[in-house]
């Protein structure tokens, strides 16, 4: 049976067989593997959690602003139809705001063509961008650059060459400050574009003033809000004739909101009636002087409270009150509607405030948080894999005595790490998703579902699993090499 | 120290030859000489016992002739092939098919069944799974464990584990079996079973068996005995030559 010894290169084992071998081993070391999986899952769930928060906040922010703007349509139009605004507010309108409405107004009031409008909007965007850049600076730096000026004054100040020179000198000295535009472009903007832009904004303002004056004479001293209640009809036409781009599609909404606002104002005046105020104070168990509009609306938010309030108002009604007719027309459902809208509006404002604060804080720390958690994860996996190698010295050495190639051992450990990474990644992504959504549900309530970024979250989960596998693969490089280079004579050692 | 050599019972082909083999280990700044120049010839088909106290360089000698470690100087020829000339991949081939290793602590892979343990070297050697299973069952039959092929190491006694280890060492029909104190962890009866299997493999299959041992029963079945002391070969003797001195040897090792 003796074969003559004829030495050839050892064949390579197929990857699928190595994979089977790895699976076999993992099944045997289930507890140890579970610990590693938990480490990976915790790190990945943290990543996922932060990601969910970021995505939901971003989506909710946009959605929230849209909805808030929609709910404030009547208020916005009431303001627009009474006040032409300042250069600053017109600048903001031109840059962002309702771009279409502004463009239509600019065409009507100033008689520009489309090219001029779009050019002005571009310039306005640059101006607003520059102001935002200034707002992000700390006080000392801002002062050195533009002094105490704000808004349009900043550009007016920079019209003077001395100020401009001081600005560029100071900007050049500040190493960490990056201007939003190249310096020469900025200089040109200050010197030439701004005066032109300012002149155009002024034209729009004058146009608005004239339109407002025309509307005032139409209303003959009546309230704009009352008039907006008939926005769907004749008044809407009149507003359009005056030159405002009054949207016909939104007119019914605006009319409804305007009526509700007028009703709400009327309801709030009843707090001045001693009978109503005292009844409220008795109901709430507080001093009459402490009753405010929030208390009133809280009471009106329930059917029972609204009915109670109507009874009190009818009992205390005085003939001379200018709102008496309006108040008589209210019923429980109407009050509930108004109170509901009001509380929704307040909720939106609250979310918006929360989002602005959270968004900034999150963006500042996000990079660090992610980096730290990635490092922790890598160290955790590397440690687990090193332990796995150390406690299997003899097994690895034995396999090498039986003819395993270095590459085979290497693959076995890389496979092991990747498998653990994949399982940990999936668990972590699921956990992080649930945790993040749970937290967001508390922050936003049902609003979360209105702005649910399902696609982004799915992509994020896939990326998290991939990150888990990648991390595990990176972390296992050193332990795997160590295992592969182990001398086979280790198997001979007796413990 | 004089080294006495002796010709084997049946003069055959030399399968392992060492030439002035030296090995030094560097521990910090202290150089430990584990082997100080050993020259030995081992013949194909013989059963040779290697003896020596711990620290004598016995394990180092084993690692050298098994292709597990490289000497500081000197050469090892396995069937006239210089081991130092082989690449890592060829060394793996050598370990896989030409040499079977049997360890004192069995070193079975704990998560594999007896059969899987036996077929692992075949898998590394590129044998198809079905063929490997068939041959694995044959080998388990030889060591008397055919009925327990599905047991894991933890479910078997020491003697059974060592028998599985022998079957595994024989997986690719090697020419040489290197046994490192195969009976040291076993009681008398199970040790006897292991010895009988080794003897049978040597007689029936002509496998060269090199066995480090302190077990005096091994001396009764081997062809030659070799003593290592302080990194040198103290003595090599045929069994029938040693028999005369058994009293004194028995006193030292028995």
Image (cartoon, coloured by chain):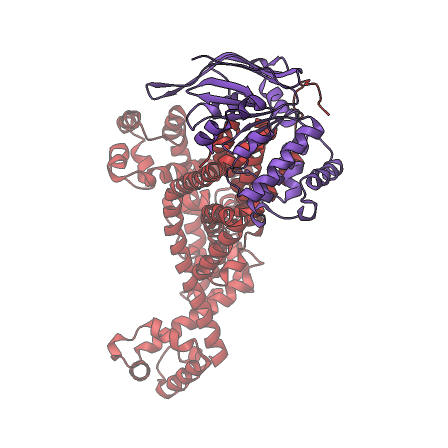
Task: Single out the residue that lies furthest toward the bottom.
Answer: A315
The x, y position of residue A156, in whole percent, is 32, 35
Q: Is residue A414 above or below residue A487?
A: below
Tell which of B207 and A471 is nearer to you: B207
Chain B drawing hue: purple
Q: Is residue B98 left or right of residue B226?
A: right
The x, y position of residue A398, in whole percent, is 55, 33
Quarter placement of the N terminus of chain A:
top right
The x, y position of residue A291, in whole percent, is 29, 75
Q: Is residue A102 left or right of residue B194?
A: left
Tell which of B140 and A275 is nearer to you: B140
- The answer, for residue A338, to whether it is visible in the render is yes
Q: Is residue A100 above or below residue A270?
A: above
Q: Is residue A47 above or below residue A316?
A: above
Name the image quarter holding residue B40.
Answer: top right
Number of dots carrying numbers: 0
Quarter placement of the C terminus of chain A:
top left
Tell which of A418 and A120 is nearer to you: A418
The x, y position of residue B117, in whole percent, is 63, 39
- The answer, for residue B170, to whether it is visible in the render is no
Q: Which residue appears at 67% of the width and 44% of the height? A: B145
Q: Which residue appears at 46% of the width and 18% of the height? A: B234
Chain rendered red: A
């Amino acid at each position: 049976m003796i074969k003559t010894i004829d030495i050839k290169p050892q064949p390579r084992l197929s990857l699928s067989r190595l994979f089977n071998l790895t699976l076999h081993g993992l099944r045997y070391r289930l507890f140890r593997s579970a610990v590693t999986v938990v480490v990976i899952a915790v790190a990945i769930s943290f990543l996922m959690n932060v990601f969910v928060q970021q995505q939901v906040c971003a989506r909710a922010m946009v959605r929230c602003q849209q909805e808030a703007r929609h709910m404030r349509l009547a208020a916005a139009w009431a303001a627009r139809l009474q006040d032409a605004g300042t250069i600053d507010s017109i600048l903001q309108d031109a840059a962002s705001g309702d771009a279409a409405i502004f463009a239509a107004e600019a065409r009507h009031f100033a008689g520009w063509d489309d090219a001029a409008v779009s050019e002005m909007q571009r310039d306005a965007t640059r101006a607003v961008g520059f102001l935002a850049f200034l707002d992000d600076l700390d006080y000392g730096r801002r002062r050195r650059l533009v002094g105490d000026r704000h808004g349009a004054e900043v550009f007016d100040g920079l019209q003077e060459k001395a100020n401009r020179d001081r600005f560029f000198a100071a900007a050049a000295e500040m190493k960490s400050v990056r201007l939003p535009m190249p310096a020469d472009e900025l200089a040109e903007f200050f010197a030439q574009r701004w005066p032109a832009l300012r002149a155009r904004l002024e034209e729009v303002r004058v146009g608005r003033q004239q339109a407002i004056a025309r509307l005032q004479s139409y209303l003959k001293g009546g309230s704009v809000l009352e008039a907006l209640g008939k926005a769907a009809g004749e008044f809407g036409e009149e507003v359009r004739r005056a030159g405002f781009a009054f949207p016909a599609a939104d007119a019914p909404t605006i009319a409804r909101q305007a009526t509700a606002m007028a009703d709400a104002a009327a309801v709030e005046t009843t707090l001045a009636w001693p009978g109503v105020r005292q009844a409220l104070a008795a109901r709430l168990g507080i001093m009459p002087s402490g009753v405010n509009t929030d208390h009133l609306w809280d009471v009106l938010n329930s059917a029972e409270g609204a009915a109670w309030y109507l009874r009190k108002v009818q009992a205390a009604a005085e003939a001379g009150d200018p709102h008496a007719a309006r108040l008589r027309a209210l019923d429980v459902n109407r009050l509930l509607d108004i109170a509901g809208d009001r509380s929704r509006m307040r909720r939106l404002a609250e979310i918006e405030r929360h989002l602005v604060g959270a968004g900034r804080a999150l963006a500042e720390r996000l990079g660090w948080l992610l980096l730290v958690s990635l490092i922790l994860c890598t160290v955790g996996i590397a440690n687990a894999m090193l332990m796995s190698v150390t406690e299997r010295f003899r097994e690895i050495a034995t396999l090498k005595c039986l003819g395993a190639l270095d590459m085979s051992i290497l693959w076995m450990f890389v496979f092991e790490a990747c498998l653990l990474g994949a399982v940990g990644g999936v668990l972590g992504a699921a956990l992080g998703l649930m945790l993040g959504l749970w937290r967001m549900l508390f922050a936003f309530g049902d609003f979360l579902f209105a702005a649910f970024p399902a696609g982004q979250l799915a992509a994020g989960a896939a990326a998290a699993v991939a990150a888990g596998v990648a991390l595990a693969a990176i972390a296992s490089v050193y332990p795997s090499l160590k295992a592969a280079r182990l001398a086979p004579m280790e198997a001979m050692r007796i413990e | 120290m004089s080294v006495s050599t002796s010709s084997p019972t049946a003069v055959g082909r030399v399968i392992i030859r060492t030439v002035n083999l030296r090995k030094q280990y560097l521990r910090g700044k202290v150089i430990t000489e584990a082997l100080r120049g050993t020259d030995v010839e081992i013949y194909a088909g013989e059963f040779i016992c290697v003896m020596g106290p711990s620290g004598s360089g016995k394990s180092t000698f084993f690692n050298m002739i098994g292709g597990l470690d490289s000497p500081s100087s000197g050469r090892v020829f396995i069937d006239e092939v210089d081991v130092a000339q082989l690449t890592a991949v060829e060394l793996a081939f050598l370990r896989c098919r030409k040499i079977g290793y049997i360890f004192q602590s069995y070193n079975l892979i704990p998560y594999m069944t007896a059969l899987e343990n036996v077929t692992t070297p075949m898998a590394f050697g590129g044998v198809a799974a079905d063929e490997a299973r068939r041959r694995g069952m044959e080998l388990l039959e030889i060591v008397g464990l055919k009925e327990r092929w599905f047991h894991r190491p933890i479910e078997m006694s020491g003697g059974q584990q060592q028998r599985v280890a022998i079957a595994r060492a024989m997986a690719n029909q090697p020419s040489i079996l290197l046994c490192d104190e195969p009976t040291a962890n076993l009681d008398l009866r199970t040790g006897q079973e292991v010895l009988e299997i080794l003897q049978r493999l040597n007689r029936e299959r002509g496998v060269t068996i090199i066995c480090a041992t302190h077990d005096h029963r091994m001396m009764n079945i081997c062809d030659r005995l070799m003593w290592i002391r302080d990194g040198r070969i103290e003595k090599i003797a045929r069994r029938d030559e040693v028999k005369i001195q058994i009293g004194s040897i028995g006193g030292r090792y028995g």
